[in-house]
Each structure stands twice: as C-alpha cells, then as structure tokens.
Image (cartoon, rainbow, N blue to C red):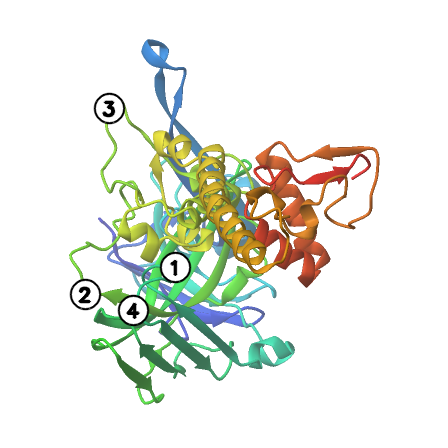
Amino acid sequence: MGKLSLFTISFSNPNGVFYAGTMIEGYVTIDLKDSMEMRGIHLTFEGKAQVHWTETESTGTGENSETRTVSYSASEKYFDQDVLLHGIWSSQGRSTTKLPQGRHTFPFQFLIPPNLPSSFEGTDGQIRYMIRCKIDKPWKFDHKTKRAFTIISILDLNSDARYSQRLQGVKEKRLCCLCCKSGPISVSFHVDRTGYVPGEVIRPTAEISNGSNRSINKSYVELRMVTKFYAEGSTRTSSTVVGRLTRPSISAHSEDIWSGEEAIVIPPLPPSFLLGCKIIDISYILQSVVLEFDNKTQPMDWSKCIVCQTENGKKKKLSCPAKSKRKDTGAGYKKFIKNIHLFEEAGCEELPEWIKSEAKDAETLAINEGKWHSAYFSRFSRTKADRLVERKRKRESDTFDKSIKTFTRVNSSNSHDPRGVTESTASTPGIFRRNMYFLCHEEGVQLHQVQTLELDRRLRDCVQDLQDQQLIAELNTASDLVAREAKYHANV
C-alpha cells in the first residue's frame, strides 16, 4: 500500500453489535510510513435494504413458445450520513493538508436512528449497515476501507398479550377409509406461550396415540423462519428450518408422551416482522408434531413436481404460484388443495401417498413453494372432481333406492291391502315430495328441478350456512339432488 501500512475502523464495542436508538462510538486508525498529502478523511454511515431475484417465464404455445428471464429488485435507504474526520471536503476547494508519518487515531460518534429494522441476510435480500472511510487524495487514487456493523431492533414481548398466550391443538386422523379396521392417530400438542427471544427454549409437550396398524418412523417439531421479499408487485417466499426437536419411532397401537424435558433452543435470529422495512418481512412458524411413517414412500422433494415427483423437462415446465406476479400467491395453492380434497372425498386412488401425507394444506405448499406440471392442474380440476363426487353420490343414491324398495315390500307384505305388493307405493323422504320445495316443504306452482351439480353444491352450501341440522340430515340422506329430482321455488 506504499506509504499506508494500516487503515482500519474499530468500535468501542468489539462485537460491532448495537441497538437501534443508541450511540456508535469508535475510531479510525491510520499508520503511515511517510507523510501523506490529502484533502481530508471522510466517514460515511450507511443503512439500506435490497432485494433481488430472477424468474423464468414462458410465453406463447407450441412452436411459438419462448422462455425469458425476468428480474425483480427493490431497495430502501434508512440513513446516509457523511462525517469529516480531518481536513476539508472535496467540494470546499483544492487546498490540501499533510498527515505526518506515524500512527494516527481519529475518534467518531454516530447516533443510530430509532425504529430501524434489524440486520438481515437472506437468499434474495438483505438489510445491511456499513461504515465507509475514505482518504481523499488530489490527483491520485483514494484509499478506502469499510466495516459492517449489526443493528438489533427490539420487539417488546410485554407490549402485546398475544405473545404470552398458550399454543395448543388436538387433531385426529385415519390413514385409510372408515370401513377399515385400522384405528385413528391422535395428537395433542401444547406450548406455554407464543413469544420467545434468542437464547430461550421452547419446551413442547405432546401426546401421540398411534391406533393405526402402521409404525410411525419418527415424529418431530420444527421451528421455521418464513421470509417474504417484495419487489415490483411480486412476492418471493423462502422457508428455513432454524430449530428442530425429533422423537423416536412409535410402533402400531402404542403411544409417545412428550413431557417437556427436551427443548428447541432459539438461535440468534432477527425479530418477527422486521418493523421499519417494507420490502422484507419475517415470521416464525412452529410446525407442530409432524409424523413420518415407516413405508416405502420417499419423503416429498419440494424441488420437484408434488404429484409425480419428477423434475422440469424441456417440454414440461413446473408451475409455482409462489413465483406468480399476483400479490395473492396463496390463491393458486388454495384452489389446488381444494380440488385435491374433493378427489379424496370421491375416493380417487390416483393421488400419490406423499400428497396425502405431506401436502394436505395450502399453507404447507406456500411455505415450501410447491410446484407441479401444468397438466396436473387440469387433470385434478374442479370440473373433474365434481364429476367424480357426482358419480359417487349417484352410486349412493342407487343404493338408497334399493333400500327404499326393500322397505316398501316388507311393509306392504305386512299390511292387509288385498291389492298385494307394489314397488311403486314407496315414497321418498319429505324433501322430494312432488310439487314441494325441499327447503320449506311448502307447495307451490313455480317450482324448478335441480338439474346441475353446480346448483346442487350451492344449495348444500346454503344449508350449511343456515346450520339447520334437520335439513343437513335430509341432504346427507339425499346424496344427489339431481338424481333425486329435488324441486325449489323460482325465487330461490
């Protein structure tokens, strides 16, 4: 470095960690082998956030399809302040000063503004705070050095009663249909509060009862940091496991009790929300009691299609709602999951085991940025799901008809009617009596017949909203309003 043998920035706090709203104190050290001519020595305090990521988009179809890479970026500046340590500013003139040979120390102070977001380093963005020092030399290259420092923003857990609330839940699930003899798996989970700071421990308690015929390979709880980056109207989401507690296997028809002796230690992490930053947001999710079964099915690889577990191909690109330009990226996941649930309701056996066990809710898909081949979105469409459900209801309706006819024969054979037994003498339940509206059972002239599955679904949703248990029971008995030729008033 010629005349310059040492050029460093030091803090009075050697760790370089400060709280928002406090004072930074330090000094710049310069060691010269010979005197140096300069205009001045300048310090710059800088704080900013930046996000940047790229996505691949396809336009057109067939031979006209094109693939291009789109970049998204945004930035925020929190402060940018210059301080003169020695000499003059370059804008004040051309006069110079000589710094003699030897070691020189220049102290500095800087008051950190309050309400700043904490320092953060992520995959697609960061919040950084930096001190830069420059020796301004006339007609020569300047000497420069820099040093990063960390700012921690305080989130007061006592300011909101929600942080001290208990977190608990109970869930029961069967691995197969109700007609099987395998019992349910039930999980109860409890955490004493929802607010923690780095260094504290989460001691979950749980009770897992495995009433099924299959072994549970292991159970675990994960603490995940979910980060969202915002730029140009788009959102990028990433999820990182920052803590995990794993328990051993649970054999069939046995249970496991978590007594709270084992814990997840909270590592040094930025606080939730990153208050003061508009382009990066952080939240923490405690994914409670995940069960991993001992079977031949491989765990979900989220980098591949969640349906067929294969990668991108030249002609088959993967679609990911998380990388959509839409602000509500969760809508695509909710729609897909809703269709999957309908296929399960209809008894569809095409769904892979990993969808049934690891991708059963839209939140899980969004956190892991689930993706699939576009062909599967049409394959598991709402229309096809509705048709499967309709066929299932039709089968149930046919079974119901047979039981009604059998009931008629029995009653007729026990009666004293000399005309004998007739299959047509049975009447269906009250909601289907001719010329009556099935919701109110009143006779009317302007009656219409339920002819589409969409209307069937809307009427069922309406009855569910009314929470009329008698109507709900009648609809469950009906199975299919279209097949039962149900009537409704014209002003429904």
User: How many C-alpha atoms fall within 10 Å of the one at disc 3: few (<14), some, or many (≥20)?
Assistant: few
Residue type, label 1: Ala
Q: Which residue is mark 2?
A: 294
Q: Which residue is mark 1?
A: 148
Closer to the N terminus: mark 3 or mark 2?
2
Distance from Cα at disc 4 to Cα at disc 3: 44 Å
Residue most extreme to the top:
63
Closer to the N terminus: mark 1 or mark 4?
1
Front-most of residues 342 and 218: 342
**Residue 376 in picture, x, y percent from top left:** 36, 34
Distance from Cα at disc 3 to Cα at disc 2: 35 Å
**Mark toward the viewer: 4 or 3:** 4
Residue most extreme to the left:
296
SS assignment at label 4: loop
Look at 55% across and 37% down and name the residue there.
233
Judged left or right of residue 123, residue 487 is right
Residue type, label 2: Asp
Look at 22% across and 49% down and name the residue there.
1
Closer to the N terminus: mark 2 or mark 4?
4
Judged left or right of residue 264, residue 418 is right
Q: In this picture, is 425 found above or below 217?
A: above
SS assignment at label 2: loop
Q: Quadrant of the C terminus?
A: top right
User: How many C-alpha atoms fall within 10 Å of the one at disc 1: few (<14), some, or many (≥20)?
Assistant: some
Judged left or right of residue 247, residue 124 is right
Distance from Cα at disc 1 to Cα at disc 4: 59 Å
Residue type, label 3: Lys
Q: Which mark is residue 314?
A: 3
Residue type, label 4: Ser
Q: Which mark is residue 182?
A: 4
